[in-house]
Amino acid sequence: MRVLTVLLYDLLNATRISEIRYDRANRMRRLLICIGVFLFCLLTLGVVYFEVRLVMEHTGVDMDLPVRICILAFSVISALFTVRGILYTSANLTRIGALPFSDLEVLFVRYLEALFRNVLFVLMLCICLSFAIFTAAEERLTFVCTCMLLPPSAFRIIHALFLLRQKNTIIPKQKKAGIAVILAVALAAAYIMLQLHISSALLIAAWAAVVISGIFMLHITHGCFYDIVAQNQPAEKEYSLNTADQTQEQALYAKELRMYLGDKLYMVNSSFGAFVLLAAAVCLAALPLDSLFPETAGIIYQCLPMLFALIISTCCTTYCSFSLEGKTRWIYQSAPVSAMQVTISKIAVNLTISVPAVLIAACICSVRSLRSDLIVFLMSFIIPFLSAVIVSAFGCLIDMLLCNTEWENAQVLMKQTKNYPITLFGALYLNGLAGAALYFLKDTLGLRLIYVIICALYLLILSVLYFCVKKKAGSFRFERN
């Protein structure tokens, strides 16, 4: 949600649109990015709309209260990022500090920006859900007006909790911040329980409470705004000699993990599949597929291992890990380690992300998989794990074959090289073909036999990849190929 909010905010920002207008060299690329972001937002909202309509039509469940709770949860997650990331950063404070602006004015501008980013996507989501749940225009308007009270309340909760954990500067105000937390939680609970047909006076009073609580929060923090900003800046790195005994493999793994965690774009691009897998597992376990799709629910549960394997194959950190070494490649060139040891450490980092997601997803859907067959339950752990290992090894092999350490922009390396589509589509085709074979041959060969065959084929492919990676690692020298 945070990513969608920021991207949509950039789309609506007039400055960014004007850059498209005047930057002729990148006009088409910028325009396509904005169009793609907008279509992605529409696709996300369309999926939400379809799922809500589907559940309501087949189950007759009242979705009002669950939807309000989900909106509050989305708002809390968004506020976790916006409070510190926008409200209390040092960006532009040096330039703004010389201008005749008070700290209250600076805080007010940032407060509105953070609140706007927290509200923007929720507004689109509420409009979409209002059309999915209700038919009368008055009910839709009431739903949107009441649900839009939730993002400001969530923002107040996270902001007040953020103030409570500050040291030194906010101690005299902690009592007021605690009162703000209680009030914000009470307001959020009251807004969730607002009925569809409420009076205009009650709705006006609720919005007045939102405004007053916002003024109260600004009053608490404006006197020590710059102190809180300074207190929340990242501390300077302190380098110290680590005398702990480490093997070469442990040191390589720690180095690769630091490189992965040091780049946010790299983390988002390479670990998105793990979050999608967890979301899919929750949906499959929670949605009543037996009543929604009575004819195909059994097939879906039987194909759970292949579905998990298909999703986790999009989680790959190795497709550019060798190329990302860049100017630091001399460390590996001069270190007493082999390229195979480096490759194993890079694969281990990828499995650190993929394996926990696979285990959690398989456990979440264990009730569903056990209803089909014991082999489905076992394979929901084994096949996604093998798929994660295969895509990790395949990514290393492709990056060694197409390694390019003479790059200037790491973002281009992560998003616009041939390595990523080759690795991604190779893994998707493998799992897609295996899933198709399972669907068409399970009645002929039997569910257990076809799963055993798929597992054996995955092991064979993994063995071939191992020998290919080992052979290439023997001659790999971190050079442009």
Image (cartoon, helix red, strand yellow):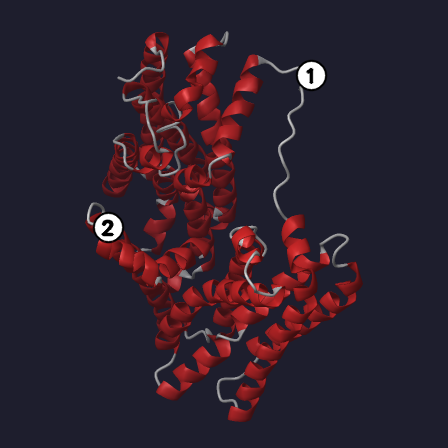
Q: How crowded is mark 2: few (under 14 residues within 10 Å), some or many (20 or more)?
A: few
User: Horizontal and vertical percent for residue 45?
Assistant: 35, 64
Residue 23: image tag: 2
Q: Nearer the viewer, residue 311 or 78?
A: 78
Q: Is residue 106 left or right of residue 122?
A: right
User: Horizontal and vertical percent for residue 418?
Assistant: 25, 31
User: Horizontal and vertical percent for residue 215?
Assistant: 62, 75
**C-alpha separation, residue under disc 2 versus residue under disc 1:** 52 Å
Residue 166 lies in quadrant? bottom right
Residue type for callout 2: Asp
Of the numbered discs 2 and 1, the one sitting upstream in the chain is: 2
The residue under label 1 is 243
Residue 309 lies in quadrant? top left
Q: Nearer the viewer, residue 393 or 185?
A: 185
Q: Which of marks 2 and 1 is in front?
A: 2
Q: Residue at x 74, y 56 (%)?
A: 169
Identify the element where label 1 is drawn.
Answer: loop
Q: Where 351 sits versus 219, above or below?
A: above
Camera sees residue 85? no
Identify the element where label 2 is drawn.
Answer: loop
Q: Which of 252 and 220 is in front in this view?
A: 220
Camera sees residue 268? yes
Q: In this view, does 233 lie to the left or right of 178?
A: left
Q: Where 36 sits versus 363, above or below?
A: below
Q: Residues within 10 Å of mark 1 (few under 14, many from 20)?
A: few
User: Horizontal and vertical percent for residue 370?
Assistant: 47, 46
Residue type for callout 1: Thr
Q: Where 56 sits versus 425, above or below?
A: below
